Image (cartoon, grey):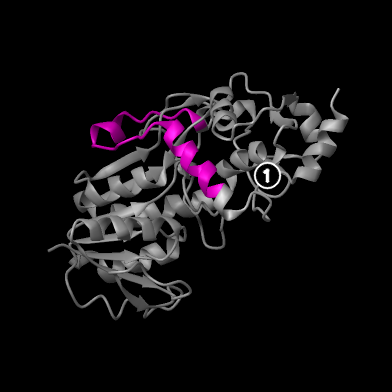
Amino acid sequence: MTDVLILGGTGWLSSRIARRMLVDGATVMCLARGGRPSPEGASLVLADRDDPAAYDAVSGRDWDHVIDVSSRAEHVGRAVAALGERAARWTCISSVSVYADDETAGADESAPLHAPAEPGDDEYAAQKVAAENAVRTLGERALIVRPGLIVGEGDPSDRFGYWAAAFLRSQDGPVLVPRSEARHAQVIDIDDLAEFVATTSVTGVVDAVGDPHPLAEVLASFRRAADHRGDTVTVDDERLIENGVAYWAGERSLPLWLPLDMTGFMTRANARYRAAGGGLRPLDETIATVVADEQERGIDRDRRAGLTRADELALLQLRG
């Protein structure tokens, strides 16, 4: 039986990985602060990773597989120091945000990275690079997975799901969309990612990303899945920026909309992921799941990303 330690295991992605490992009969232990329960069938060790003694309860034994999803390099470095010698395999969940070049379409795992974080530098990409560097000390036992935008049921970021909500809530009314020419969307379904982490035997670095799709096709798929019968109204980048609409994420944003000089961020190569056995379900299937999930969670709920319907309608009044 495989003994798996997940550093986390109670969050959106890590709990999905834990459940997938359990399906294969693994013994799964989660180490987390305990704000949320561990998945049924997994044990939970309570620990605060800011505490230097966080790993004392799990460091006195061998592990077949340690999986870490942390975005904090200090946490990852301490975990490697405490557990690395007794881990047969180590998976670090990183991010494509580590890449310094967001312009080059089709770039792969060999592309240059941002500089690693120095003390006091909390920038996400730099922290991920520093975390990767700590894991690299484990040599051929380590797998570094760099996902793109992770989407699917229960997504707490509200980015991909925004477009389901936008088309659902408008009913027969208009929906504001950005200019889609020369823009793409590239996502990875959370269940495909969890399957890959749980089942692959490869090591090294793998970009876990889906196929790039023209943004217009992605928005059209959301529209079909939501059975939207109204108009879509395209608003130029300049007008959106002038009126305080942010790219990508956050309050008053348009998710999936990125500057044109970031073409490479959503068009990365996924040949290594596919060669390593990574699966990709049809995008329409993922979108259908997201639409159903947004309906269940409530399309008018407060969101971490996107426009409110009131803001959207106000912006539509300003177009011209």
Quadrant in the rendering for residue 82 = bottom left
Give 308 or 91, whichever is nearer the viewer.
308
Q: Position of residue 233 (x, y in %)?
A: 74, 25
Give 308 or 244, whichever is nearer the viewer.
308
Q: Position of residue 125 (x, y in %)?
A: 51, 48
Q: Residue flagged by tag 1: what amino acid is it?
A: Gly
The local crowd at label 1, few if under 14, some if 14 to 19, many if 20 or more residues have their Cα within 10 Å, is many
Q: Is residue 66 shown above or below 232?
A: below
Q: Position of residue 256 (x, y in %)?
A: 59, 35
Please give the range of residues in magenta: 266-294
Name the image quarter holding the C terminus.
top right
Q: Is residue 303 magenta?
A: no
Residue at the spot x=42%, y=24% of the render? 106
Residue at the spot x=61%, y=27% of the render? 261
Q: Is residue 20 shown above or below 236?
A: below
Q: Position of residue 80 (x, y in %)?
A: 30, 64
Horizontal arrangement in the rendering, residue 37 relative to residue 162 (left or right)? left
Majority SS type along the magenta span? helix
